[in-house]
Image (tube, helix red, strand yellow):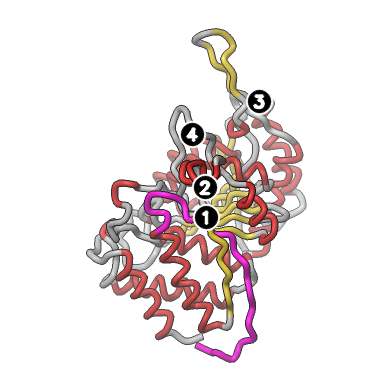
């Protein structure tokens, strides 16, 4: 690797999370620092807690200092944070997405080498609207035993996410976009989403545009994922389909995620916090590492991103230092050692 690169300095907000969060985030910080040292890139990490741990310490699930750090740095890396089911505090993810208008959830789905899959060579991009739909959280009890939950779709939000999808496809030479919907039933809300997508599609004649109903899409994906290229979805559909597609590459423990807005971006592992294996040197940091590679590209550090991706893929290709969840026997620390060694042995 070349050391003759002028230093580039980045301040990054780090939300380690809970459960295995501190382990996987610590692993990724070590790998990026090693890659940065070789490439002339310096990271200043600003660590903050969120969720139950933050409430115990600060009396707030998201401390004001964390908001301020993201506003200042405009980039954050986030490990998994436990969200209570059916009660407790609101999702930290959803809260942060709303606060910073992170309207685009970006989930590339690509196989890693060395892992067997029913669908080798998958190359999908999931673009999910991130601030509207059912996730606005507008719910109330009408009368005892009857709960109403509102789904909000706007022309602004639908047009904005469609433009994001088509712009990404155009920049990255993606050939086709499918808008996924249920407009046969939700004719007004999903109908508005489709009208906006169609209007945006007119400006990109070089990209094929099609529409599929959400339930049929799930079946088609399982039967033949290769027929799809880029999927454009509303919030809830995108949440479900992105997890479904993660199964093609080995599960959520491998899938990266990015939440992007006009001003800020948060890159995160989309898997759970796995408290049952926390602190046991068993966690696989691959998902957060792949998310950090998206972060590097966002920062304009494409060369460094390629180096980290290459090191990760070489470790998977060799299979000597993989964690147990992907068929290996190595611990978290041994896996990280292997990635760092691959980085140091590579060439820029």
Kindly state the secondary structure of the residue where label 4 is placed: helix
- Give the labeled residue for mark 1: 15
Q: Are marks 2 and 1 in contact (CB under 8 Å)?
A: yes
Nearer the N terminus, badge 3 or badge 2? 2
Q: Position of residue 243 (x, y in %)?
A: 45, 45
Crowding at label 4, few (<14), some or many (≥20) Cα neighbours within 10 Å? few
- Give the labeled residue for mark 2: 50
Residue depicted at 59% across the width and 64% down the height: 12
Decide whether residue 98 is among the magenta residues.
no
Kindly state the secondary structure of the residue where label 3 is placed: loop
Tell me where the magenta segment starts and ends, as one range: 1-22
Q: Position of residue 110 (x, y in %)?
A: 45, 60
Residue depicted at 34% across the width and 74% down the height: 337
Instruction: Please tell me whether mark 3 or mark 1 is closer to you in this view.
Output: 1
Spatial CA span between label 1 and label 4:
35 Å
Kindly state the secondary structure of the residue where label 1 is placed: strand
């Amino acid at each position: 690797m070349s050391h003759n690169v002028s230093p580039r300095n980045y301040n990054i907000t780090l939300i380690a999370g809970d459960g295995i969060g501190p382990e996987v985030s610590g692993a990724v910080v070590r790998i990026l620092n090693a890659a940065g040292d070789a490439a002339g890139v310096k990271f200043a990490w600003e660590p903050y807690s969120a969720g139950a741990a933050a409430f115990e310490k600060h009396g707030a699930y998201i401390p004001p200092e964390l908001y301020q750090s993201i506003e200042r740095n405009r980039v954050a890396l986030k490990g998994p944070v436990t969200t209570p089911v059916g009660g407790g505090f609101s999702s930290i993810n959803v809260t942060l997405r709303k606060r910073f208008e992170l309207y685009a959830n970006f989930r590339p789905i690509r196989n890693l080498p060395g892992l067997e899959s029913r669908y080798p060579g998958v190359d999908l991009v999931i673009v999910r609207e991130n601030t509207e739909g059912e996730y606005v959280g507008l719910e109330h009890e009408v009368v005892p035993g009857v709960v109403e939950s509102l789904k909000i779709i706007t022309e602004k939000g639908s047009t904005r996410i469609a433009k994001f999808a088509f712009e990404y496809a155009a920049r990255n030479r993606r050939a086709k976009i499918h808008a996924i919907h249920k407009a046969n039933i939700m004719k007004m809300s999903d109908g508005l989403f489709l009208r906006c997508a169609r209007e945006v599609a007119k400006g990109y004649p070089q990209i094929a545009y099609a529409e599929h109903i959400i339930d049929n899409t799930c079946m088609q994906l399982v039967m033949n994922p290769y027929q799809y290229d880029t999927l454009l979805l509303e919030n809830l559909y995108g949440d479900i389909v992105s997890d479904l597609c993660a199964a093609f590459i080995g599960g959520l423990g491998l899938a990266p995620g990015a939440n992007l807005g006009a001003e800020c971006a948060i890159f995160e592992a989309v898997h759970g916090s796995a408290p049952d294996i926390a602190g046991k040197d068993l966690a696989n940091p691959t998902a957060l590492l792949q998310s950090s590679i998206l972060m590097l590209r966002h920062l304009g550090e494409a060369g460094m991103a390629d180096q980290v991706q290459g090191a990760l893929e070489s470790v998977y290709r060799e299979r000597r230092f993989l964690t147990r969840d992907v068929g290996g026997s190595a611990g978290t620390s041994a896996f990280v050692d292997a990635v760092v060694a691959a980085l140091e042995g590579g060439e820029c």
